Image (cartoon, rainbow, N blue to C red):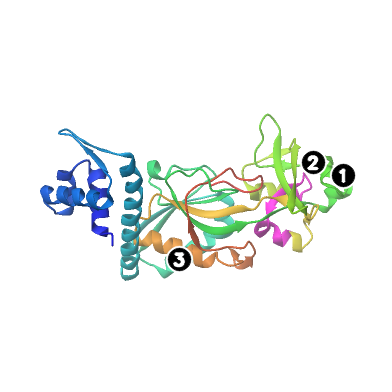
Amino acid sequence: MQDLNDMLYFAEVVERGGFAAAGRVLGIPKSRLSRRIAELELRLGVRLLQRTTRKLSLTQAGEIYLRHCAAVRDEAQAAHDALTAVQVEPRGVIRVACPITLAQTTVGHLVPHFMAQYPQVRVEMRVSNRVVDLVEEGVDVALRVRVSLDDSGSLVVKHLGESRSMLVAAPDLLVRQGQPRTVQDLANLDTVAMSAVEGRSTLRLLGPELSGKRSEHLLNHQPRYVADDLVTLQHAVQRGIGMTALPDYLCHTALADGRLVEVLPGWAPQAGIVHAVFPSRRGLNPAVRRFLDFLGAHLRGHEIVIGEEVCVPSLQDTWTPSGSGSAPSGVAPG
């Protein structure tokens, strides 16, 4: 059976740049460490390192093996950190970046409950739709909503669930400009949007399934009003300025009391993925880990807290590889 210690030793030798440096970190003599790696290569039947008098370099087989060794080491560290976190009372500062609408409708109401539960924790929350550089700006956790998870580089992602949006408008707008019967009729309505390029904005809509595949439509429109905050847009929509896409957790009250109506049910933007990103699982601050677990517990299963109320999006609590994509129109970036 593979000796997992040798996998750890190999990863440390490569990442520390040599046997002497790795030996100092591991508390193992350089000669013994060199012998262990040589025996490892013999057992595997491949050369992992090219040795010269000046430096070490990885062979192709060594590059492949290193990825797996590093993963094993990081998972072992994560297991240790998880047990430590259970035993250690969370304390210290958590720096969180959060999109404006998510903070106003959900996270801003959850954080005080978290802080009441963990009195030794302080929270600094940066509320902005700007995409932050976590490492450069010293942010522990960034909350984001994206339609895909494909460009967060080396960041780790905790997937919280989905934010579903719908097309909405004020009843008087539809009286003035007509109730759309087909997706093409949407072009007859005035619109508002979070962004526009040279005065125009594009909204990708998904519709009913046809032959096992959901139909799609790109609504290219010229919004009358552009604002990078969903709550601001909702005020304009309720005053009849135009139609837009809003998350269901944001507009459910206005729909219930008749200030807004859903436009063309069956057609909607792609759901946004609600997730938290952070630099690494390795050595994760216990307070940050508890905060992530707290969010997962409160945003799991079909509930997003809005003030004292509760509303939909289906949410799950899973770890996934990192990434993020562009936000759909009507979903705030983070």
How many other residues sit within 10 Å of disc 2, few (<14), some (14-19) or many (≥20)? Answer: many
Q: Amino acid at mark 1?
A: Gln
Q: Residue furthest top?
A: 198
CB under 8 Å between callouts 2 and 3? no
Q: Specify which label sits upstream in the sequence, 3 or 1.
A: 3
| Residue 310, picture quadrant | bottom right
Percent of width and height locating residue 173: 83, 48
Task: Please determine whether, in this image, residue 125 is positioned above or below residue 220.
Answer: below
Looking at the rendered image, the quarter that the N terminus falls into is: bottom left
Q: Residue at x 74, y 37 (%)?
A: 220
CB under 8 Å between callouts 3 and 1? no
Task: Please determine whether, in this image, residue 147 is positioned above or below residue 92.
Answer: above
Q: Is residue 276 left or right of residue 209?
A: left
Q: Is residue 334 left or right of residue 225?
A: left
Q: Which residue is mark 3?
A: 114
Q: Which mark is residue 245?
A: none
Percent of width and height locating residue 321: 47, 52
Q: Which residue is mark 1?
A: 177
Range drawn in magenta? 237-254
Alpha carbons under labels 1 and 2: distance apart: 8 Å
Q: Residue at x 14, y 54 (%)?
A: 27
How many other residues sit within 10 Å of disc 3, few (<14), some (14-19) or many (≥20)? Answer: some
Q: Is residue 252 left or right of residue 78?
A: right
CB under 8 Å between callouts 1 and 2? yes
Percent of width and height locating residue 182: 85, 47
Q: Amino acid at mark 3?
A: Phe
Q: Does the magenta segment cover residue 151?
A: no
Dot 2 falls on a residue whose secondary structure is loop
Q: Which residue is mark 2?
A: 190
Q: Specify which label sits upstream in the sequence, 2 or 3.
A: 3
